[in-house]
Amino acid sequence: GFGCPGYYASIRGTASDEKLRRVPKIGMHIVLLGPPGAGKGTQASILAEHFDVAHVASGDLFRKHLGESTELGQLAKGYMDKGDLVPDDVTISMVLDRLTYSDASSGYVLDGFPRTLNQAKALDGALIESGATVDVAPLIIVSPEELVRRLSGRWICKGCQSPYHEVSAPPNQAGTCDLCGAGLYQRDDDKSDVVRSRLDTYESQTSPLIEYYENQGKLVKIDGQRDVDDVTQGLISALGR
Ligand code: AMP
């Protein structure tokens, strides 16, 4: 499995042995589940770097479209401002298209997608076509009070999307990213009334995915109310099973 030291070496084709080079590219396909504010973005970015796979965040893709004022961005804005989900058809085609980029060829950590049963089924369908499957769906669990606290104090880097918290994880220099030096901003949808509706949307539309992946034997519950490093360790051992 993913925990075996030789696993990635073999699928990346670094081994000189001819037989190993012919091992099909299995790849790593992880779906990170959890409510807004659970830490999916933070953990997905760490895991993607650790395993050298792509970090694909549907919210970041929408925000990129918004920033570039594309037609899709304009459409998505209406839903994002209210804390509603962008319709499945456009969301699914945007994400599935992103998964065909070369950086995703050895796998990906999905963050914020799927968020509906339709999206989960569309992902499964696309994976089956390429002879693959979702490997593990870790669910990061955090209490509702803690989610509200995290989201309402959140600041994000305009350049590299690194998250900060004004109380519990402030940058060294106010308003500036420690990692890339770009400015920080607060997401419009992290304002309190929209936070409420995003959490409601999660409960009604996304939480059914927990059962979906549980029925497939892919769900692993992770306590998200610990230090970032401890959560990462929990995730890495979950992926090694
Ligand atoms: P996020 O950055 O993951 O919190 O996403 C921000 C917003 O983008 C959400 O509140 C939704 O409006 C929209 N969005 C992101 N991912 C999806 C998705 N998989 N399906 C529908 N809407 C999404």
Image (cartoon, grey):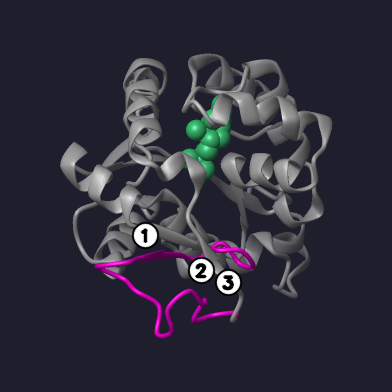
What is the chief secondary structure element of the magenta stretch?
loop
Q: How far apart are marks 1 and 3 (CA)?
A: 31 Å
> Mark 3: which amino acid?
Gly
SS type, badge 2: helix
Q: Is residue 12 left or right of residue 227?
A: right
Q: Is residue 198 above or below residue 183?
A: above
Q: What element carries label 3?
A: loop
How packed mark 3 is, by other alpha carbons closer than 10 Å (few <14, some 14-19, many 20 or more), is some
Residue 94 position, x and y percent, is 74, 32
Q: Residue 50 carries which label?
A: 2
Q: Is mark 1 within 8 Å of ligand 1?
A: no
Tag shown at residue 79 = none
Q: What residue type is labelled 2?
A: His
CA–CA distance between discs 2 and 1? 9 Å
Label 2–label 1 contact, CB within 8 A: yes
Residue for point 33% across, 29% down: 199
Q: Is residue 212 left or right of residue 31?
A: left
Name above or below for residue 140 compared with residue 202: below
Marks 1, 3: nearer the viewer:
3
What's the residue type where badge 1 is placed?
Answer: Ile
Q: On the image, numbered disc 3 is attached to which residue?
A: 183
Magenta-tinted stretch: 157-180
The quarter of the image that holds ligand 1 is top right
Judging by the rendered image, the residue that carries numbered circle 1 is: 236
For this rendering, which residue is in front, 193 or 90? 193
